[in-house]
Image (cartoon, rainbow, N blue to C red):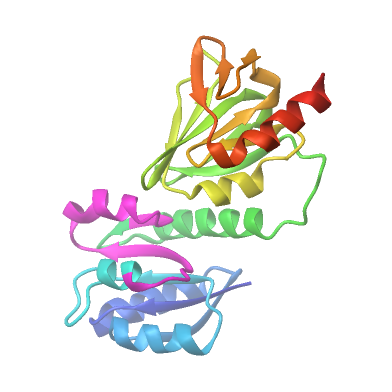
Amino acid sequence: MLKCIAVDDEPLALQLMQDYISKVPYLQLVTTCGDAFEANQVLQEQEIDLVFIDIQMPGLTGLQFIKSLSHKPMFILVTAYEKFALESYDLNVVDYLLKPVELPRFIQACNKANELYQLKHKPSDAGNEYFFLNVDYSMVKVMFSDIMWVEGLRDYLKIHLVPPAKPLIARISMKAVEEELPPSKFLRIHKSFIVSLDHITSVKKSSVFMGEMELPVGETYKETVEMIIKKKK
């Protein structure tokens, strides 16, 4: 069960969310909140998996609230304003629902959240050959064998795949992706780069080549890179 709350300053909107949530068997509604301050109090007191939240609310908007949190549950935005969609994408929300929300569309968003929750909480399996990445509100299956290298770009990551596949861009931390990748197949060579050992074509003292692409080896990673390469010889 996903423990969830609904946040909206409009009582009728909250009532509708409460009704919709009751129709989804894997959702457990903990409470409803009239503003972000109430929601923050709930998050401080107990573990919440999913938050349905409006954007335009007095005092603190939904987007401001999400940005203020250091430990974030999953969020589904429910709003009458389409103009905030791009900004919400930067916050890596699960979905963006426009009012008035129809039940089938609501269930579709909930299914995304449930799938993401199950992926995050699945037992570790060393035999996995892939992981799922949240890209543009969709869970994309990424095969480890298709990844050439991962590049950090400020708040985003760019995952370079074997051609002709196009790179994937996602708002996720380097640490989070590194935890998904098997250490037997991937190597951190720089604060901004993780490479696939299978796709390394040559190595210099301060760089690694992935085909024609030369990637730098950070000073703090040189010793580790040398040790790994020696073991692979």
Magenta segment includes 8:
no
Residue closer to the observer: 180 or 59: 180
Depicted 180 relative to depicted 48: above or below: above
> Left or right of 81: which side holds 223?
right
Residue 139 position, x and y percent, is 52, 43
Q: Quadrant of the N terminus?
A: bottom right
Can residue 164 be seen in this snapshot? no
> Left or right of 142: which side holds 78?
left
Depicted 64 relative to depicted 131: above or below: below
Depicted 6 relative to depicted 130: above or below: below
Q: Quadrant of the C terminus?
A: top right
**Part of the protein shown in magenta:** 68-96
Residue 32 position by quadrant:
bottom left
Q: Residue at x 52, y 77 (%)?
A: 48
> Left or right of 157: which side holds 90?
left
Magenta segment includes 73:
yes
Residue 164 position, x and y percent, is 50, 12
Toward the top, the furthest residue is: 212
Residue 75 position, x and y percent, is 42, 65
Q: Residue at x 56, y 51 (%)?
A: 176
> Left or right of 167: which side holds 96?
left
Residue 208 position, x and y percent, is 58, 21
Residue 31 position by quadrant:
bottom left
Can residue 76 be seen in this snapshot? yes
Depicted 51 relative to depicted 194: above or below: below
Q: Residue at x 38, y 83 (%)?
A: 40
Q: Residue at x 32, y 58 (%)?
A: 97
Residue 123 position by quadrant:
bottom right
